[in-house]
Image: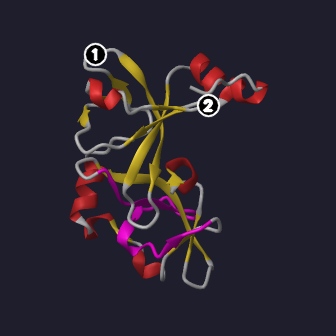
Amino acid sequence: MIKETILTKLPILNKDYEVLNYKVEDIVYCFKEFKVLGLYLQNIDSTKRKKIIPYFKIKNITEEGIIINSLYDIVNIEANLEIKHAIDNYKPMIGYEIYSEKNEIIGIVRDPLIRIQNGKVLGLIISEGIFDDLINGYSFLPLVKDFNFEEYKIMLTDKEELKILSQQGGLKKILGIYKEN
């Protein structure tokens, strides 16, 4: 597993672990299948057109970087119509608001957790407010099939809301005052 925020900071490497002249600018998601379609890249030395790496071209993701075979795996956006459509209708997953059935805000997506092998989004790390995060740490919402993605918000049913896992972090963990349920 890898967090989106870590993925976007990794260098692009060829199969010989040589650093390529690109940086990850963003992640392109398919919201219907909750998976990563590709990585949106910027050439470090140029402000010319941006390029993409389709996720299926990624050989591995390690602490050293995102490994592809060669520069030929980096293509123009127009080369993949599904990714081009996703970029044209781009919505960043980080920052999505999460609401209950009663239209009350539950939290905000802080970071998606992605399965490295296939790009599938496994769940969302969510912030439930600065004070709650400080005291208890972030919470985790495992991804379920029927998430209702709307314009910049996620609507959860009461059943889905019950699946939110509270983290036992923050100041309670640091101070050792966390109680087991």
Q: Which residue is mark 2?
A: 168
Check disc 1: other Cα within 10 Å, few if <14, some if 14-19, many if 20+: few
Which element is circle 2 on?
loop
> Which segment is the magenta one?
34-62
Residue at far bottom of view? 16
Instruction: Classify mark 2: residues with Cα within 10 Å, few (<14), some (14-19) or many (20+).
Output: some
Identify the residue at horizontal 61%, vertical 29% (top origin). 137
Query: 169 or 98, which is in the foreground?
Result: 169
Element class at badge 1: loop
Q: Answer yes or no: do the residues labelled 1 and 2 have beta carbons within 8 Å?
A: no
**Whether residue 153 is visible:** no
Residue 155 numbered tag: none
Where in the figure is residue 112, as x and y percent of width and height? 45, 45
Q: Position of residue 51 (x, y in %)?
A: 40, 65
**Is residue 143 in view from this perspective?**
yes
Which residue position is annotated with label 1? Answer: 103
Q: Is residue 124 above or below residue 108?
A: below
> Which quarter of the rendering shows the C terminus?
top right
Marks 1 and 2, how far apart at CA: 26 Å
Q: Mark 1 vs mark 2: give the one in front.
A: 2
- Looking at the image, the residue that sits furthest to the front is 181
Closer to the camera, 6 or 75?
6
**Which x, y percent locates residue 102?**
26, 14
- Label 1 or label 2, whichever comes before in sequence order: 1
Name the amino acid type tagged 1.
Asn
Q: Residue at x 41, y 44 (%)?
A: 123
Q: Left of 8 or right of it: where is 39?
A: left
